[in-house]
Image: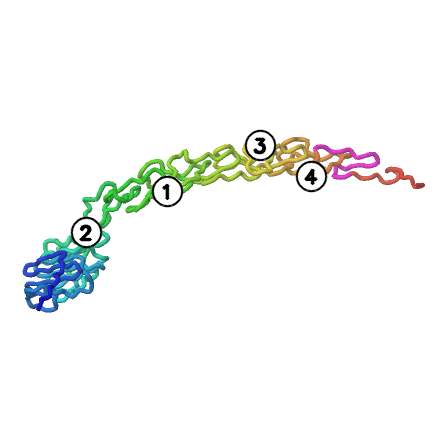
Amino acid sequence: MQRKRRCAAAAAAVASGSSHTCALLASGNVSCWGGNANGQLGIRNNLDTVTPTAVDLPGAAVSLSTRRDHTCALLNDGSVYCWGQNDKGQLGIGTIVKTNKPQRVQQLAGPAVAVACGSTHTCVALSDGSAYCWGENTDGELGVGSTTSTSLPTQAIQLGADICPNNSVANGTRCLCNAGYWEGSGSGGACVACSAGTISTALGASSCGNCVPGTYATGIASIVCSKCAAGSYGMSAGAQFSDSCKVCSAGSFSSEGSISCTNCSVGMFSNQGASACLNCDAGTYSSRAGTSSNSSCAKCSAGTFSPQGASSCLNCTAGMYGPLIAATSNASCLSCSIGTFSLGGASSCSNCTAGSYGTGSSTFLICPYPFGPVWNINM
């Protein structure tokens, strides 16, 4: 009878402790063999074995580490499972009781990307770049700023603070690009200066943002955009120079950082590049928006007057007259003399006609009969 051939499993990695060995297979399974007095094989008993025996894990392993009498595996979901000796808390499960069954490491702050076992302690690197360690700490091997041992993961402090690249600072366990820089794609972790017209305002920016319309940034590595000066405006995002800001035309104005200019209201005017509009002088007026100069404010005609900022002139009242052009107030209006009269807005008073008389008012009166006009009653 022909003997069937057995297909050998492909090993992706192997790790050895003091008296045991484990292999990570290409399938993500883990097998261990050798001494097992402390459960370091993870096969749910404490019997030594010379035959590789599968470890029962809840998922596929992607990394494996062993040392002395304990073993840890990193699974593809970022979780970490450990088993074996635990007299110093090296399994990270919150106790110092050894176990021959894989136990999940407790209280990790995020998914792990690497695991490494020491003789009686263990460390992992997390996806955010931080490192957590647990177990014996007699010589400070946990990197937590003390020599106190712990059975739960504790974050290592000041990790890599002295090796941050240029234009970056350490932030806990990570290096972050300074404001004004960003971590450019393909830059190998180097911080790249924001180009002119763009900024980054916070540590660790993944990109630079354009200056908004009405602002500009002239140099590289800017952290703030400068505003266009009052009396000017900017319409484009990402402007690089102050001359990107255009001057407001006469008859309009703008405040700092504007994206457009606003026409002056009626009764007002402005010169080119104005930050505010001015009132037309008393005695003048402007009836349209956007008047470009004080000389463009028209003078009030005789019989009228205006205060500052007028959009039209006011008439002298009936019974009065205004002899002056560009009068500035009602005080410039004079009363008609006796024997004369005026309607509103008059530049002079009119004489009463024959047969009538005036008291210096807005109308004339007919003289009573027989002093008034003689009427032909025989008609």
- Which residue shows up at 68% across the image and 34% down it? 303
Q: Tell me where residue 38 appears, x and y as whole percent.
A: 8, 65
Look at mark 3 in the image and give the residue it sits on: 296
Q: Give the residue type that dot 4 points to.
A: Thr
Q: Of discs 1 and 2, which sits in the foreground?
A: 1
Look at mark 2 in the image and give the residue it sits on: 157
- Residue 348 among magenta residues: yes
Q: Give the residue type that dot 1 points to.
A: Asn
Q: Is residue 148 visible?
A: no
Q: Tag 2, which secondary structure?
A: loop
Q: Residues within 10 Å of mark 3 (few under 14, many from 20)?
A: some
Q: Residues within 10 Å of mark 2 (few under 14, many from 20)?
A: some
* Distance between mark 1 and mark 2 Cα atoms: 36 Å
Look at mark 4 in the image and give the residue it sits on: 317
Q: Give the residue type that dot 3 points to.
A: Ser
* Distance between mark 2 and mark 4 Cα atoms: 88 Å
Q: Earlier in the sequence, mark 3 or mark 2?
A: 2
Q: Tell me where residue 314 appears, x and y as whole percent.
A: 65, 38
